[in-house]
Amino acid sequence: MAITRAQLVKELLPGLNALFGLEYDRYDKESEEIFDTESSDRAFEEEVMLTGFDTAPVKSEGAGVAFDQAQEAFTSRYTHETVALAFSITEEAVEDNLYDRLSARYTRALARSMANTKQIKGASVLNRAFNSSYPGGDTKELCATDHPTVGGPNLRNELSTSADLSETSLEQALIDIAAFTDERGLKVALQGTKLIIPKELQFVADRILESPGRVSTADNDINAVRNMGMVPEGYTVNHYLTDTDAWFIKTDCPNGFKMFDRSPIRTSMEADFDTGNVRYKARERYSFGWSDPRAVFGSPGA
């Protein structure tokens, strides 16, 4: 008795789903080193940046207490994108009993494609960090020298003079992070936590962060960055960064990089009446972005 398309779908689906999950999870989720994941149940998410208050004044004896009012500085919007791909196995392949071999091969390729797209989407936030064509909620690109604020000086989260990754440039970036202020110009207690680099800089980063002494010197100086624990989470290599000499420091800013998961990855399979083909689909919906530019400090390289 010949197997029907409906029976074929029922028999193949559990195994293909398991195979898809194993292949999808096999690839490193490098975006998770950068983004905090939150769930969403709407078409988009918006986060409002509040200014906080100004410096508290001295209250004279008998005088009334001063009042201040927080304001909305800007709004960051995360618009979810649907990512989906499918393949089909022809009716003739089913007739010739090729479906088992083809479906396993195609399912692995589909999982690889979906995983790859997600990492590209995540890395694009940093790949566009110095491009003014991709502004954030404050109308500036992610890394800029002139992020506007409500009452304080403009925020700068890139080096005044672009530089390649080195001991000197890293130290200057950490000093600049320590000088960050909020929307009203008050100091904020932020520090760099993790260096994010392309694969081309991994050897440079390892020497800078892991050497006991200063790199490329004959002096008996200690490696101050390592000795002071200034980058406590070390470095992470993101293989989807496209600029070979750009580098970034992620800070401990609490409302920075985010990935909103609107619809987790799902797979489905069905038989098509018109063609006789069997079709298998994967789909997920998410968005990557940033709310507070203080989440990162970067340099495009020299």
Image (spheres, helix red, strand yellow):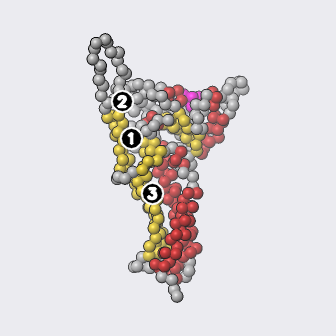
Amino acid under label 3?
A: Pro
Indicate the secondary structure of the residue bearing disc 3: strand
How far across and how far down the image is residue 275, in percent?
42, 78
How far across and how far down the image is residue 40, in percent?
39, 51
In which quarter of the view is residue 53 placed?
top left
In the rendered view, would you say 219 is above or below 72? above
Mark 1 or mark 2: which is in front? Answer: 2
The span shown in magenta is 168-173
Would you name the residue on which mark 1 appears? 136
How far across and how far down the image is residue 264, in percent?
45, 57
What residue is shown at x 45% (from left), y 67% (from top)?
Answer: 268
Indicate the secondary structure of the residue bearing disc 1: loop
How far across and how far down the image is residue 279, in percent?
46, 72
Q: Is residue 124 left or right of 236 when viewed as pictured?
A: left
Q: Quadrant location of the C terminus?
A: top right
Amino acid under label 1?
A: Gly
**In the rendered structure, does residue 171 fall within the stretch colored magenta?**
yes
Would you name the residue on which mark 3 appears? 264
Residue 8 visible in the displayed image: yes
Q: For residue 52, which numbered disc appears in the image?
A: 2
